[in-house]
Image (spheres, rainbow, N blue to C red):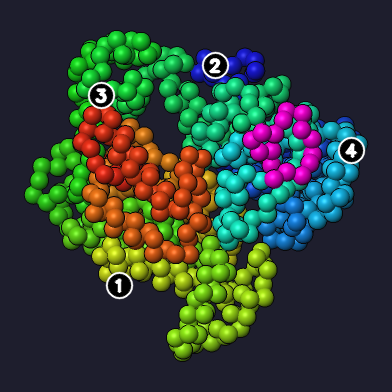
Amino acid sequence: MPSLTTEAEQFEKIRTKVFVNSEAAVRELGSAIGAFIRQRQAENRRAVLGLATGSTPVRLYQELIRLHRDGLSFQNVITFNLDEYYGLPPDHPESYRHFMEVQLFRHIDLPPAQAHVPNGLIERNQVFEYCANYEAQIAEAGGIDIQIVGIGRTGHIGFNEPGSSLDSRTRLVALDRLTRRDAARDFRGEANVPAYALTMGIGTILEARQIRLLAWGESKALVLRSAIEGPETTAVPASFLQRHSDCRCYLDHAAGSELTRFRTPWKVGPVKWDPGLTRKAVTWLAETREKPVLRLRDEDYTENALASLLVETGSAYSLNIRIFNELQHTITGWPGGKPNADDTNRPVPAEPPFKRVIILSPEPLDAEIGMAGTIHRLVNQQHEVTLAYLTSGNLSVPDSEARMAFSLLNELGVSKPDSLAHLDQLAAETNRKAPFDEDSRELRQFKGLIRRAEARASCQILGLALDRVRFLDLPFYQRGRYRQFRWGSEDVKSVVNLMCSLEPHQVYVTGVGADPSSVPGIAYQLVSAALENCGKEPWFPNCQFWVYASNERPWPPHEIDMAIPLSPAELAIKLDCLYHHRSQRSQTPFTETQAGEGWQQAEQINRATARQYDLLGLAEYEAVESFRAQKGGRNR
């Protein structure tokens, strides 16, 4: 249990700092690590770091590289990595040894002999002895000074899945199915993800003198609340970090959003009741008491730490009516505005009656998952809709889908276009390559065509003319791979050119709460940069900017600024549209509580949002797509 917690942090059993974004977090942690290394250099001693992999620590490693370029030496550093996939060679593109080489080791002056990553190719009958020797090497180095860890959506640290014991040591483990699903995109399909891994144990991790846990994005928020505020339990292995005397969590706002001080801040001390927090409190109370908003009574407020809200607003009766009306005003069947209607309480202005709309999709399928029903509405209501796919999505196409496409083309006897003159060679490449081998540039191009065909088919179901579909193929994606993307000015320029050529009245984007190194997270960053460049354009002040929901979790009603209800027929159209993205079936990441194909998960989320509105006492709908207003334009 941390000492000297503030009033706001009283429910947190691990000291936690929440930053405005991941960049601010890694700057602070990177500075502390750099200072520690320099201190050990002055003492002529070694600094022993425990390192993690995955998308979360990428930005920390970028900060350490920046510090090295500014003069920080790693000559006196010894590193030990948490884990490695079992069965992958060190030069495999998805091995953690390769990850560390690409993300950190080759960019700093760390002596190779001082970098330790578990060997994924050790013979099975030698694994126990090898793991014991890995522990001995850590002890010989003097123990780990600072251990970096991330957290998986199962609550794992390292690859210590639920059920791992407090005293576990370095060992071979079987990977949880959710962990393998989350890695499916990296491996072009869940079937290709290794079933086992070598990992430090929880007992090994807890022996580090300092532990620093990093987490970004709203997909980690719920499990972080369990790890930081819940009981210690093998069901959430990260919860055992509570017993460490010097463990700290570094989170961005999205990852920390479910902590009590953010989720229900009135429970930890006095708050300033602004409109947003008031709406959040009332909807939370209605859900907690399982009552519609209009049936909440004064005693419901006073018995749930909300007496101060009634002091400021007068009575439950007037407050309930106000919040009910606010929620009701988010619901509209006219995402482009209703012509010739009073738009005082509508999320979208009536004028102009027919709007130019740009929908930005990080990869094919993202926009369809988030807002296919809304796209269908916009098209039917005669708005000029342009759907722009920022990237080709070719990295997530399994080889099996490419083989099927080659087979179909051969069966049809289709002549090969000049750009694919070597189609036979590409077919041979897919037949001989191992599941984890890198695709050639030409094969990636072909897989991109598969996703284009799927996207066009889905757009036709939504009634969107194909000349309104754009494929930007942004350079950051074409040159990179998952976890290793770097966006730049070329990417921003492409988005700026699109917007300035169309002069939109509405722009839809996603990724605001995503992991910053994910494709949606990167897309949101570069689109935000593009919008900054457009700030002086004449169309900009009259443009609305909307963020559509991802497939992570239903947004709570207090976060929704526009809710588009879907009828049973409209929901069926959306599911038909999603189903046409054949190559992505079973490729979409899953949440802890949901199962099925990505299109089924989207249905579950849209239905869950509708149920939330229904339980608050509003109209009952089949499904609801949700949007947040983004500051910067005409959003009210």
- Residue under label 1, please give it: 467
Mark 4 or 2, closer to the camera: 4
Q: Amino acid at mark 4?
A: Ala
From where the camera sits, is residue 210 visible? no
With 504 as the anchor, is 219 left or right in this view? right
Image quadrant holding the C terminus, namely top left
Q: Position of residue 594 (x, y in %)?
A: 46, 43
How far apart are labels 1 and 3 at the CA level? 46 Å
Closest to the observer: 624 or 628? 624
- Residue under label 4, please give it: 136
Closest to the observer: 105 or 70? 105
- Residue under label 2, please give it: 10
Mark 4 or 1, closer to the camera: 4
Q: Residue at x 14, y 42 (%)?
A: 343
> Magenta residues, as a range?
159-174
Q: Residues within 10 Å of mark 2 (few under 14, many from 20)?
A: some
Q: Amino acid at mark 3?
A: Val
Which badge, 2 or 1, comes first in the chain's sequence?
Answer: 2
How far apart are labels 4 and 1 at the CA level? 63 Å
